[in-house]
Every structure is written in structure tokens, then in C-alpha cells.
């Protein structure tokens, strides 16, 4: 994770691991019989860490308040504002020039009668024209600078998200994956459902990472994946030299990203990603519905829930502000005490609860304070809910009016789909998540994704500590559901389990599993980077044993 700020590596996703768990039944005197596999891709946030989250425009200092800050979601909104401002300024400039020519037309008639020569240029000393011209030039410079910044960030973040998505897709066609449980045909018809489970807090730099990741994940909708045999002869002779070899993989030989729509832009842009595979593996291990040039389109969804002290602080600060605002509303207009309390809450609560973040981080000391955005998590989860609801209706039609049509990625809020029966618990969790650390949003989204045959990824800033807590909880939950399932006809996702049993198995996996070596690889010591304060405010299912967080060299 320490390399994520390297400019030359910024397009490559970091700390990407395929976390798999296979269950087998062992009978004495017989070979073990595999009965279940679950996997998640774990990774760091697909964000442009090298460019940071404070952007300086042309002629501006990054520390100035006028310079846009944040990730892509915020920067793209700011770009729209500047473009609108430029258009209005240019219209004002055109109007000022028009007014000048109208007033000069009257003078020109008199000068012509007097035999004087009329001037055709615009004098440089007209205040109204000078003002609008200067403002138009400044807006154009800011727009072009921000457009370039957005374009570079989109490319870097999209590249990271694409690498993560392809990793999840290939893991899903591996032995025991959902492709071999009948879902390959679903992917070919409706797209490959890919749910990103984010654990970032909507405060400071992590808020910028959420904004970058949200846009990058949505961009995956532009990509269709095609599995081809390495023996396949390219239809275009120019395409073979553009194939990027994958030298260390026993199954994947090369990849080739093709720009399908040379004249497209934004949502109309389409890419075709061809993955060349070992011919024998392709013939024997790739499911039939994914052969013969079948293009599988990504259907990416993001669910996001902060689970650390900073998110708790942001939520608590918002609750205090709301209470004080209610009190202020009930007081007379001349009551200055309520107003003073409200101002104190805005500065002190948010500053104390979210400002000192350098200590409260997953092993990195590059974070800062900042105002929290308490709305973005709820809004992103509502967006994710609508998309997942559309996909569920497409794959598992719940009524005669919706009979398996293609899922809609861009949904109209004016004509929402009815709530799919399987989405009820997720809907309730999202409704109750406003200003709360409601981990069940991620839990229920993950269960629905598994039930629909999709892929799953888990990420925090670096993909090691918070991510480790979440993925081990998911694996323990999978094991316990398998053990407690009473009937083969009952889906694992619908099996009720005891939290106590799941927590115990989560602890075993954190102590003896493969997440501790991931931490050692990144931080130099086989411990999770949580201090006592962080542990205290984490949700119970994600709280590690204290012994796993006691570093021999705390200063590191």
C-alpha cells in the first residue's frame, strides 16, 4: 500500500488478493468431497492517490479555498458549475458587445451625415465589456484545467477498477465458482453482477477516495469481457501486436482492450476486453455459455459504509447539530444563546470528532481532518439499491409485468421499479442507516449478490486492516450457514445463524488465516493496525482481538 502514491503505478490497483474458502466433507476411508466455495476480491480503494484530493487549477494554489478539492464525484459536479458559469459569462459578453454596437449605431448616423469616418473596432476601455471578457477568460482557463484533471483521474481510477473487476470475473469462473452453479448463462444474458463493499469513512481524504471510487466503478458499465482461446486468430491483423502478455499466469496468456466506439463519449463509450486463455483450459474449464465470442457486460454496484472512529464521530457530530438546530427553531428570534450553541457545535464537534485523524488510520499517516459529508453514504447506498433491485427483477422476475428484461443501469427516479421480495431486508437496512454505522447494509448486499450469482469485492483505503475484518466475517458467516442449514433446498443466504458462533469463527480466521501475512507484507509486522480507541468504536462483528493489534514497535 505504500506504493499507491507512485505516479508511474497509479493506474494499477494495489493490494489485490483473491480471498477464497473451500469446504469439503471428509468421510473416513474416502477422498474428501468438495461441497462449497466462496471467494471475495480484497483491494485498496480504486482512487487516484498520487494526485491527492486537493486540486490546484490554472494559476491557483492548492491551499486556496477557490481550488476544487475532493474526488471525481465532487470534481465533475464542480466542472459542470464552471461550464455553466462560463456559458453565462459569454452570453453576458455578447450582450455587452451588442449593446455597444446599438448605441454606436445612433452616433454613426450623425457622424456619417457630418462626413466623418466611422470606427469599426470595439474600444478597449469600455468597463462592461472589459469585466465580462476578463471573467470569461478566467472561467475558460479554470474549465480547461479542471477538465484535464478530471480526464486524468478518470483514466487512472478506471484502470484500477477494471483490473479489480476482471480479477473478480476470472475468480468467479474458477472451480466451484458461480459460473459452475448455473450462473454463466445469467451473465451472458443480463451481465456480470459485481458488488463493491466499501469500508471508507466520509471524512477528509477518505471522502475523496469514495468520490473517486464511485465514478470509477460506474465506468465499468462501459466494458464487455470476452474469453477467447489463445489459438484464436484475430479478425484484425493490427490487433495481435496490441495484446498485452501475462507472462506468469498458467491460464491467462494475454489481454487486449479494444475501444469499440471511436466517436462515443461518456455513457456512449464502450470497450471490449478480450482475455486470451490457454487453449486446453479454455476447452475444458470455460463454461459453454461464455465461449464462442460471448460478450459479458459488467453490472457494477457500490455499497459503502464507514466502520471506524472517524465515521462514528461524523455521525455523532451530525446528531448534535440536528438537536441544537431543533432547539434553536423553538426559541424566539432574539434568543442569541441557541445561535451561539449552534455555531459552537458546527466548529467544535466536527473539529474534535473528525479533525485528528492521523492517529486513527489503518497504518498510514497521510490522512487529514476535514468536514464530513453525511449524505454521500446514504445516497450511494440508495443508488446501489435501485440498481440491484433492477438486476434482481431481471434475473428473478417477481411479477408478470417484469418478465426477465435486461436490467436498467441508469434508472429514472420518477418511475422506480417495485421492490423485489428479496430486497426487503436491504431496503430496511438502508432506511435505518442515515447517520448510523449500519453494517447490515453491506452484509445484506453481499448475501443478495451471492444469491444472484455475482462477484464480490471488499475494500478500505489500503485493503489490509478493515478489509481483513470484513472478509473474515463473511467467510465465517458462510461456514456457519453451511453448518446450520437444515435442508439442501434452503439457500445458504437464507439460513439464520448465531452471531456468537460467527464471531468465534471470525476470530479463528483472523488469528490463523492469511490476512495477518498481508498486513506483514504491507506494514512490516504481523499485526492489525488498530489502536484501542479504534477497536472500541468498530462494529462488534468487525472488532479484532486485542492481542492481534499489540505491536512490538508502536511507533511504526
Image (spheres, rainbow, N blue to C red):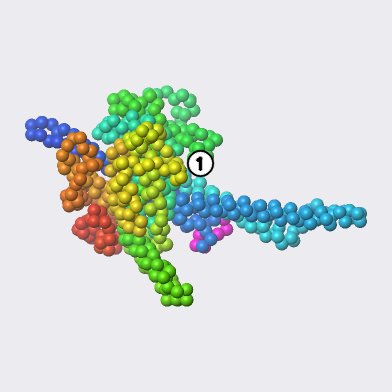
Judged left or right of residue 405, residue 509 is left
Most common secondary structure along the magenta stretch: loop
Quarter of the figure with residue 299: top left
Residue 37 vertical position relative to residue 149 in the rendered view, above or below: above
Quarter of the figure with residue 24: top left
Quarter of the figure with residue 408: top left
The picture places residue 549, in percent across and down from the top left corner, at 23, 58
Residue 67 seen in render = yes
The picture places residue 85, in percent across and down from the top left corner, at 59, 54
Taking depth in this image into account, of 203 and 450 the one nearest to the observer is 450
Residue 356 seen in render = no
- Point out the image quarter for the C terminus: bottom left
What residue is rendered at 40% in x and 67% in y?
Answer: 326
What residue is rendered at 34% in x and 38% in y?
Answer: 392
The picture places residue 478, in percent across and down from the top left corner, at 22, 43
The picture places residue 206, in percent across and down from the top left corner, at 39, 55
Judged left or right of residue 443, residue 381 is right
Q: Which residues are magenta?
A: 58-64
What residue is rendered at 10% in x and 34% in y?
Answer: 27
Taking depth in this image into account, of 162 and 395 the one nearest to the observer is 395
Q: Residue furthest left?
A: 29
Question: Residue 185 magenta-drawn?
Answer: no
Mark 1 surroundings: few (<14), some (14-19) or many (≥20) residues within 10 A: few
Task: Check disc 1 and report the residue beneath it.
Answer: 266
Taking depth in this image into account, of 194 and 24 the one nearest to the observer is 194
Q: What secondary structure is marked by label 1?
A: helix
Count up the numbered dots. 1
What residue is rendered at 80% in x and 56% in y?
Answer: 104
Residue 46 vertical position relative to residue 355 in the rendered view, above or below: above
Amino acid at each position: 500500500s505504500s506504493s499507491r502514491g507512485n505516479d508511474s503505478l497509479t493506474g494499477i490497483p494495489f493490494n489485490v488478493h483473491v480471498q477464497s474458502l473451500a469446504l469439503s466433507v471428509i468421510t473416513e476411508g474416502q477422498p474428501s468431497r468438495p461441497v462449497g466455495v466462496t471467494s471475495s476480491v480484497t483491494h485498496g480503494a480504486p482512487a487516484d492517490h498520487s494526485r491527492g484530493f486537493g486540486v490546484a487549477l490554472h494559476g491557483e494554489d492548492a491551499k486556496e479555498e477557490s481550488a476544487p478539492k475532493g474526488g471525481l464525484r465532487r470534481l465533475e459536479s464542480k466542472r459542470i458549475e464552471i461550464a455553466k458559469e462560463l456559458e453565462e459569462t459569454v452570453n453576458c459578453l455578447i450582450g455587452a458587445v451588442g449593446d455597444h454596437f446599438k448605441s454606436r449605431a445612433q452616433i454613426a448616423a450623425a457622424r456619417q451625415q457630418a462626413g466623418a469616418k466611422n470606427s469599426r473596432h470595439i474600444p478597449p476601455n469600455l468597463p462592461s465589456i472589459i469585466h465580462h471578457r476578463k471573467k470569461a477568460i478566467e472561467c475558460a482557463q479554470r474549465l480547461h484545467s479542471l477538465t484535464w484533471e478530471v480526464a486524468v483521474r478518470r483514466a487512472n481510477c478506471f484502470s484500477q477498477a477494471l483490473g479489480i473487476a476482471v480479477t473478480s470475473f476470472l475468480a468467479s469462473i474458477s472451480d466451484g465458482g458461480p459460473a459452475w452453479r448455473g450462473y454463466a448463462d445469467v451473465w451472458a444474458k443480463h451481465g456480470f453482477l459485481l458488488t463493491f463493499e466499501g469500508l471508507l469513512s466520509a471524512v477528509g481524504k477518505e471522502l475523496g477516495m469514495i468520490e473517486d471510487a464511485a465514478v470509477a466503478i460506474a465506468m465499468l458499465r462501459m466494458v464487455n469481457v470476452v474469453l477467447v482461446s489463445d489459438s484464436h486468430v484475430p479478425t484484425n491483423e493490427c490487433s495481435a501486436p496490441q495484446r498485452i502478455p501475462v507472462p506468469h499466469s498458467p491460464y491467462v496468456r494475454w489481454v487486449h482492450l479494444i475501444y469499440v466506439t471511436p466517436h462515443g463519449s461518456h455513457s456512449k463509450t464502450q470497450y471490449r476486453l478480450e482475455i486470451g486463455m490457454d487453449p486446453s483450459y479454455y476447452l475444458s474449464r470455460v463454461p459453454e455459455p461464455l465461449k464462442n465470442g460471448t460478450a459479458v457486460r459488467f453490472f457494477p454496484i457500490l455499497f459503502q459504509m464507514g466502520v471506524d472512529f472517524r465515521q462514528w464521530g461524523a455521525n455523532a457530530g451530525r446528531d448534535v447539530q440536528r438537536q441544537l438546530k431543533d432547539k434553536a427553531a423553538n426559541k424566539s428570534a432574539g434568543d442569541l444563546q441557541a445561535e451561539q450553541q449552534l455555531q459552537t457545535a458546527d466548529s467544535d464537534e466536527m473539529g474534535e470528532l473528525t479533525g485528528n485523524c492521523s492517529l486513527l488510520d489503518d497504518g498510514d499517516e497521510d490522512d487529514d481532518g476535514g468536514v464530513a459529508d453525511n449524505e454521500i453514504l446514504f445516497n450511494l447506498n440508495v443508488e446501489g439499491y435501485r440498481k440491484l433491485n433492477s438486476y434482481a427483477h431481471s434475473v428473478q422476475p417477481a411479477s408478470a409485468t417484469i418478465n426477465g428484461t435486461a436490467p436498467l443501469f441508469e434508472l429514472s427516479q420518477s418511475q422506480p421499479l417495485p421492490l423485489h421480495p428479496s430486497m426487503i431486508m436491504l431496503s430496511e437496512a438502508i432506511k435505518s442507516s442515515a447517520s448510523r454505522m449500519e453494517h447490515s447494509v453491506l452484509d445484506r448486499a453481499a448475501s443478495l449478490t451471492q444469491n444472484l450469482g455475482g462477484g464480490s469485492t471488499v475494500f478500505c483505503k489500503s485493503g489490509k486492516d478493515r478489509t481483513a475484518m470484513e472478509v473474515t466475517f463473511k467467510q465465517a458467516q458462510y461456514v456457519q450457514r453451511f453448518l446450520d442449514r437444515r435442508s439442501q433446498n434452503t439457500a445458504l443466504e437464507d439460513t439464520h445463524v448465531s452471531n456468537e458462533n460467527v464471531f468465534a469463527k471470525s476470530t479463528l480466521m483472523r488469528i490463523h488465516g492469511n490476512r495477518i501475512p498481508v498486513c506483514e507484507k504491507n506494514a512490516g509486522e504481523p499485526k492489525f493496525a488498530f489502536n484501542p480507541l479504534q477497536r472500541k468504536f468498530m462494529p462488534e462483528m468487525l472488532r479484532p482481538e486485542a492481542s492481534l493489534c499489540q505491536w512490538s514497535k508502536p511507533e511504526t
